[in-house]
Amino acid sequence: MDLLTTSVATVESGSEPYTLVELVGEADVTNSDALREVLDAEVAKQPRTLIIDLSRLRFMDSSALHVILRANRAMDRQGGVVALASPRDPVAKMLRLTAADQLIPVYPSVEDASAG
Amino acid sequence: MQPSRGLPPPASANDPVFHTYRSDLSQVRALVLRHARQAGLTEGRANDLVLAVSEAAANTLRHTPSAGILAIWHDEDEVVCEIRDEGTITDPQVGRRKPPPGASGGHGLWLVRQVCDLVELTSDANGTTIRMHMALRPPGAAR
């Protein structure tokens, strides 16, 4: 089994659809290029909102964080928003220590994230 | 390559566990987590140590073409993880300053220094050794 698997969905919710990317497993320097490809492809479709579901991500290192920050910058430039949903404790702490949670909103659930 | 070129582990420590890694950091993290739990670190601090060691080992993959060596040992006071590789760090202040929010690099060793109780870093042309210490009974902790 791959260390990190990603799945992408477009969710029709209320007024506006959003893109949901779920990360499952462990995201680190060994798979950050693959993660970048996935996020780049979704950002290129110019969604209004890109939600990254972290609920099943057991581990994230700074390489993966940089990929997410990069996607956030690109979305910001095109007028979109990235949101992170339900990080587990170790991932939440890492987002806090790097102050990434001050740049990208973190929500307790995908539902909360989609409600903005 | 000697796993530890600097100070040897203290005599009171148990025998170090050694692990050579080239690409599989998941294995490195699992080993650190298992050992940290066995030594008695709380779950939160065990995960902190896992993050620190993973970041240090990620630098081996990023900056050197060769394998790195992880050593773990503990005594009654602390758990220590050591990452040694053939890379050279020229900036002695590396990781001491918080990268600006959104910076696209430089978080690795900064995180290492944030989550560990003590970090020793030695580096020269022969390689780099990073020792990450976690106290088993942190000062001020009730447990």
Image: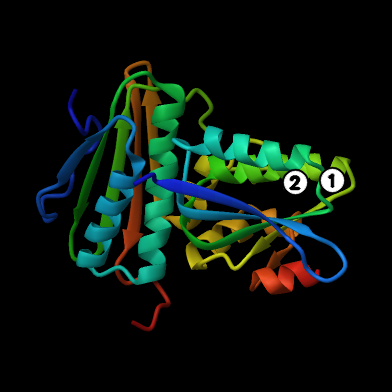
Q: Is residue B13 left or right of residue A6?
A: left
Q: CA distance from mark 1 to mark 2?
A: 6 Å
Q: Chain of mark 2?
A: A
> What kind of element bears circle 2?
helix
- Label 1 SS: helix
Q: Disc 1 marks which residue?
A: A76
Q: Chain of mark 1?
A: A
Of the pair A37 and B134, the residue shown nearer to us:
A37
**Residues at circles 1 and 2 in contact by the CB criterion of under 8 Å:** yes
Q: Which mark is residue A35?
A: none
Residue B95 visible, this orientation:
no
- On screen, A34 above or below B1? below
Residue A72 is labelled as 2
x%, y% of residue A48?
Answer: 84, 53
Q: Residue furthest top?
A: B125
Above-or-below relation of A76 to B128? below
Q: Is the residue at mark 1 from the same chain as the one at mark 2?
A: yes
Considering every residue shown, the one lying at the far bottom of the view is: B142
Give the percent coordinates (x, y) of residue A53.
60, 60
Residue A98 in sight here: yes
Up the image or down, B38 lies above or below A76; here it is below
Which quarter of the figure is the C terminus of chain A placed in? bottom right
Please name the amino acid that badge 2 sits on: Asn
